Amino acid sequence: MRRPTLEAVAARAGVSRATASRVVNGQTTVAPDIRDAVLRAIDELGYVPNSAARSLVTQRTDSVALVVSEPGNRVFSEDPMFSTAIRSASVELEAVNKQVVLMLVSSPKSHARVERYISGGHVDGVMLLSMHGADPLPSALSRLRVPVVSYGRPAVPVEIPFVDNDNVGGAESGVRHLVETGRRRIATIAGPQDMIAGQDRLTGYRNVLRDSDRRSIVAVGDFTRESGAVAMRQLLRDDPALDAVFVANDLMAVGALQSLRQAGRRVPDDVAVVGFDDIEAAKYTEPPLTTLRHPIAEQAAAMVRLLLNLFEGGPTDPVILPTELVVRESA
Amino acid sequence: MRRPTLEAVAARAGVSRATASRVVNGQTTVAPDIRDAVLRAIDELGYVPNSAARSLVTQRTDSVALVVSEPGNRVFSEDPMFSTAIRSASVELEAVNKQVVLMLVSSPKSHARVERYISGGHVDGVMLLSMHGADPLPSALSRLRVPVVSYGRPAVPVEIPFVDNDNVGGAESGVRHLVETGRRRIATIAGPQDMIAGQDRLTGYRNVLRDSDRRSIVAVGDFTRESGAVAMRQLLRDDPALDAVFVANDLMAVGALQSLRQAGRRVPDDVAVVGFDDIEAAKYTEPPLTTLRHPIAEQAAAMVRLLLNLFEGGPTDPVILPTELVVRESA
DNA sequence: AATCTCTGAGAGAGCGCTCTCTCATCCACC
DNA sequence: GGTGGATGAGAGAGCGCTCTCTCAGAGATT
């Protein structure tokens, strides 16, 4: 026994398939009694429209791809930014009855797969999450003439709408906080320099240091806890007298705190630490982390709105959301 | 200009649509030269099969739903278990060319949506993640005659294949470790009692305490950091003399550590702490957390295999994976 | 040479739906 | 009473693909 078709519904209600279709799609040009008969038939048969058949004719699928370019190793699993963004986007899309197809792309091989999938008409649009600088996906997809939006400014100058937070400004206010609280030797643990967020936060750091006449001390991590711990040890070796460090994300800051503890440095007494992101864990470090909050969920929601606008012809100007310094105990 | 169809490919290659289809689907009954001509046409036109049309006739979609029942508030975003499982399942499915449709269900309203979506034939099968005890989804879906597997033993006695870790055994070995290291007053912060993992880990705790003639001291959390912190304060009030606590997941253990610190208790000197899950963050707490490791990624992979077996008629016996005690400094 | 495989390719139905076009019916108006 | 315009419902094409059925032709067998 297979699932009932519209044909079956029509037969049971004693109408034509066309009329049944009208009822299913909520058209108003159906007399109330006939309408009721059809609805009853639908209910009795447990009819659910076949999506493949529908999208074959409508050329729509009512689902969108969420393509996550993994920044390597295990960041996806560890960094709550991803799940927060995914969750928010998913909720937002659910509200307009669209489905999320999640695509994790790590290798160049899966890159081709994504492109094939998307050009296969499976989805009406694409949301791109966290790509690296050299990611060929944005341009590849926009070439496919598929509606694409991006979470985070694309590194390559490609004309796709995007949502981002003010990475430079945020970093600046974080570092400025360190300057204003009297820190002299301010280091930074930068993010991966093939990611825009990594670059921009480093730029913000440099801007403030230049303006306040301090020397920059830089180590680079890859946004993982582990890399933060490694980078912190490195910094302590490079400049044992440093008294502050601006870390480009909270996850690395957690690692940095551990290295500082192991090196016998007190935070914030000996070394002040400022993170970036304000993930939940920032409240639970020892000491709790001073960091820059930016609204991840709102950013994801804004991205969804951008995509919907792309479908319906609304405004698609880039959205830049502000960051906010959250002062806790680490700085 | 719309996307090229198989018809166009056939025309360009000078063959029939049927032959072109044979080539696309890798059938061997096509002469090499004709085959080459078709492949060339495909390449030149940039042809990609229309998935809707294909699945309309094949009755397959090559995508599966990953339904995540959110255990309330923000656990999904914070607990890396989810992203790890999602990632692993996604990678595993990608390997067999299937897509993941992510469905987050929180409200009963979205529950109906999920059911409708699934019975709409959008997906070939369903993977269920982390449902509560009263979750009606497992039975509802298995009633729809859709292949369903579950990550975590379903609470209701429904006949669906599942993968789980040995929650009872894991909890037992964790608590036993506390007993063996000489702890006398061992409390627990249990997980939500409407979740199997919450129940089973509490059972394990109780088993060992009963056997070692100790009194159980229980507070209940909801697997969030915050709830762990609250529960720990509660426990300290209930029994200021406790010298150990078994926490049902690492996230709550992080919160508990903070509360212990704020209460001036040293870990592990005054109070030993054992967590559960061995998330990455467990290495970075102060002190690093002794906890029970279970292979989340493998579990997700096993779940995928179960689903594939359901499609192809392989074995679908429940899979229970072992846990392993990882001793760090907190106990 | 006649028949019989076997291989390779085409014809065409049909998956379940939407949507345009057509048409019957009804009421209003002159 | 006849015409015009709504209104509501049906007929049927067609979305792009797969797959069975059919058949032409090449080679093998008697």
Image (spheres, coloured by chain):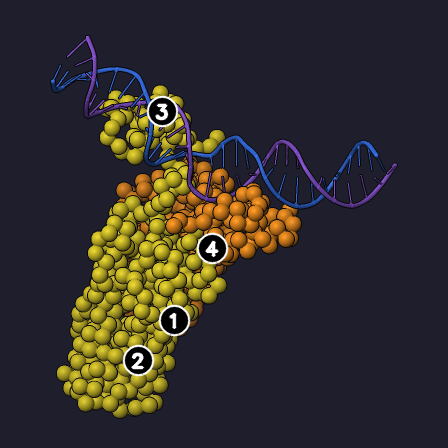
Chain colours: A orange, B yellow, C purple, D blue
Q: Quick check: marks 4 and 1 in contact, CB under 8 Å?
A: no
Residue occupying the point 27% across, 54% down:
B310
Give the label on residue B134, or none. 1
Disc 4 crowd rating (10 Å Cα; few below 14, some 14-19, many 20+) is some
Q: CA distance from mark 4 to mark 1?
A: 24 Å
Q: CA distance from mark 3 to mark 4?
A: 39 Å
Residue occupying the point 26% across, 46% down:
B96
Quarter of the C terminus of chain B within the rendering: bottom left
Could you tell me residue B27's position as x and y percent? Answer: 26, 32
Badges 3 and 2, same chain = yes
The chain carrying label 4 is A
Give the label on residue B189, or none. 2
Residue labelled with disc 3: B16
Could you tell me residue A96's position as x and y percent? Answer: 51, 54
The chain carrying label 3 is B
Q: Quick check: marks 3 and 1 in contact, CB under 8 Å?
A: no
The chain carrying label 2 is B
Foreground of the two, B316 or B267: B316
Q: Nearer the viewer, mark 4 or mark 1?
A: 4
- Amino acid type at circle 4 is Gly
Closer to the N terminus: mark 2 or mark 1? 1
Foreground of the two, A311 or B200: B200
Disc 2 crowd rating (10 Å Cα; few below 14, some 14-19, many 20+) is many
Residue labelled with disc 4: A46
Q: Where B36 sits versus B63, above or below?
A: above
